[in-house]
Image: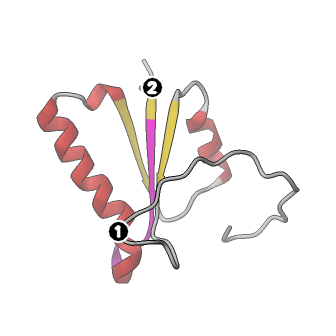
Amino acid sequence: MQAGVVVFATGNRSRGDDAIGPLLLERLALWLSAEGRTDEFDLIEDYQLQIEHALDLQGRRLALFIDAGWGTPAPLEFYAIGPAETPVEPSTHQ
């Protein structure tokens, strides 16, 4: 059975500040295990999001994305996202 919440963490552990996503996901995994709640969450770590990750969103009630940001107010920022209003040109890093 699929968990209701999926958490995506993107970043590169070898690049210092870009490692915040994977490192936070690691701590989240430990906390969920200690609380006995691992079956409620699917945790996904990757260097960057890929089109295939869209399949991981199907049937979820909530998806959280953790990534380092440029100019993000310290220490963090939460906001809702939705589909783009205008088409986005394909790129290898968007």
Q: With 19 as the anchor, is 57 left or right in this view?
A: right
Question: 29 or 74, which is in the foreground?
Answer: 74
The residue shown at (58%, 36%) is 57
Depth check, mark 1 against mark 2: the one in front is 1
Residue underneath mark 2: 4
Three-letter amino acid code at the position of disc 2: Gly
Question: 70 or 53, which is in the foreground?
Answer: 70
Q: Residue furthest front?
A: 73
Q: Is residue 60 above or below residue 28?
A: above
Quadrant showing the C terminus: bottom right
The residue shown at (36%, 33%) is 41
Q: With 80 as the anchor, is 6 left or right in this view?
A: left
Q: Is residue 76 above or below residue 7?
A: below
Quadrant showing the N terminus: top left
Question: 59 or 81, which is in the foreground?
Answer: 81
Residue underneath mark 1: 75
Q: With 38 as the anchor, is 73 left or right in this view?
A: right
Three-letter amino acid code at the position of disc 1: Pro
Residue 10, percent from left and from top: 46, 61
Highlighted range, magenta: 6-14
Mark 1 to mark 2 CA distance (whole Å): 27 Å
The answer to whether residue 8 is magenta is yes
Residue 36, percent from left and from top: 17, 28
Q: With 71 as the anchor, is 76 left or right in this view?
A: left
Residue 7, percent from left and from top: 43, 44
